[in-house]
Image (cartoon, helix red, strand yellow):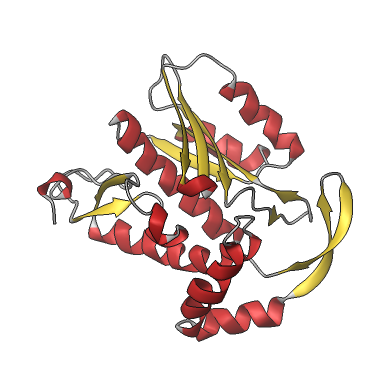
């Protein structure tokens, strides 16, 4: 392994001198092989790398069902089918939980096939990816009194995040990876470099169904002091 990522501060837990490997902020398995080069990579300790890999295994298996990418069908037939053959428990869960629901899409209700989905894992992974991107783009490890909140905000919550994305930033980044597999915008506050706001779309605008049966194709995230994040977790959806 390259010395670039060994014995460094872990991008996720910020433990000094703990990294044992370099971790792709966006798992390579999300991408077609021709798009796996030059993906953001950061130092990670063994524990964080393993925990993030568990989330990625689940989400690289489930999320392609919602993909709007042009190669979505072949991804399901080849890669997802292979992953499900190795995870019989998840395969049975998806098959038994499949159903049709009336889902809000573009302002109207439409009948659509849905699969059971653990949204907490979705948000947890995006929160980790934000930590990794802050290290990758801005060479900053969040202080221990900071945290990250990620959510698939409905219309009532979108305005909150869009307001911050419209403000002047110390640094900002806008990137498209894998021909649209991931697209994100990140802005860092001027007077508080640990405060940042992010907006992601995944798989060409894949929509995830929330508890209120409203679907969202946008994932918002914020890094801030823990007391601010605690407030967000309670009030912004």
The answer, for residue 143, to whether it is visible in the render is no
* Residue 132 visible in the current orientation: yes
Q: Quadrant of residue 38?
A: top left
Pick the front one: 196 or 63: 63
Determine whether, in the image, residue 197 is placed left or right of residue 137.
right
Q: Is residue 32 above or below residue 87?
A: above
How many callouts does the rendering have?
Answer: 0
Please report the residue visible at 60 percent of the width from the left and 58 percent of the height from the top: 119
Q: Look at the image and tell me in which quarter the N terminus lies.
A: bottom left
**Residue at the spot 83% in from the left edge and 66% down from the top edge:** 101
Query: In the current view of this chain or complex, which residue is farthest to the left?
Result: 3
How far across and down, in percent of the image, does residue 125 sit?
47, 53
Q: Position of residue 98 (x, y in %)?
A: 72, 76
Image position of 89 with respect to 23: above or below:
below
Rendering coords of residue 80 (x, y %):
52, 73
Q: Quadrant of residue 42?
A: top left
Quadrant position of the C terminus in the picture? top right
Q: Write down the quadrant of residue 8 in the picture.
A: top left
- Residue visible at 45% across and 83% down in the picture: 86
Q: Is 19 on the left or on the right of 114, as rendered?
A: left
x and y, in percent, of residue 31 in the image: 45, 57
Q: Decide if residue 114 is on the left or right side of residue 48.
A: right
Q: Residue at x 46, y 49 (%)?
A: 178
């Amino acid at each position: 392994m390259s010395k670039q990522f060994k014995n460094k501060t872990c991008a996720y837990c910020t433990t000094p001198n703990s990294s044992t490997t370099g971790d792709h902020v966006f798992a390579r398995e999300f991408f077609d092989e021709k798009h796996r080069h030059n993906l953001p990579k950061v130092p990670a300790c063994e524990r964080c790398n393993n925990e993030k890999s568990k989330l990625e295994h689940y989400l690289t298996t489930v999320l392609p069902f919602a993909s709007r990418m042009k190669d979505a069908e072949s991804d399901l037939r080849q890669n997802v089918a292979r992953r499900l053959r190795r995870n019989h428990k998840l395969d049975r869960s998806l098959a038994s939980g499949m159903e049709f629901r009336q889902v809000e899409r573009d302002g109207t209700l439409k009948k659509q096939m849905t699969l059971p989905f653990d949204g907490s894992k979705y948000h947890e992974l995006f929160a980790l990816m934000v930590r990794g991107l802050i290290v990758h783009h801005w060479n900053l490890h969040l202080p221990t009194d900071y945290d990250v909140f990620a959510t698939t905000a409905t219309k009532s919550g979108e305005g909150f995040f869009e307001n911050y994305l419209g403000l002047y930033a110390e640094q900002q980044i806008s990137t498209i990876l894998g021909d649209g597999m991931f697209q994100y915008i990140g802005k860092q506050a001027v007077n508080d470099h640990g405060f940042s706001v992010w907006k992601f779309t995944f798989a060409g605008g894949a929509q995830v169904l929330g508890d209120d049966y409203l679907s969202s194709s946008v994932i918002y995230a914020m890094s801030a002091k823990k007391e601010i994040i605690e407030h967000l977790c309670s009030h912004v959806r």
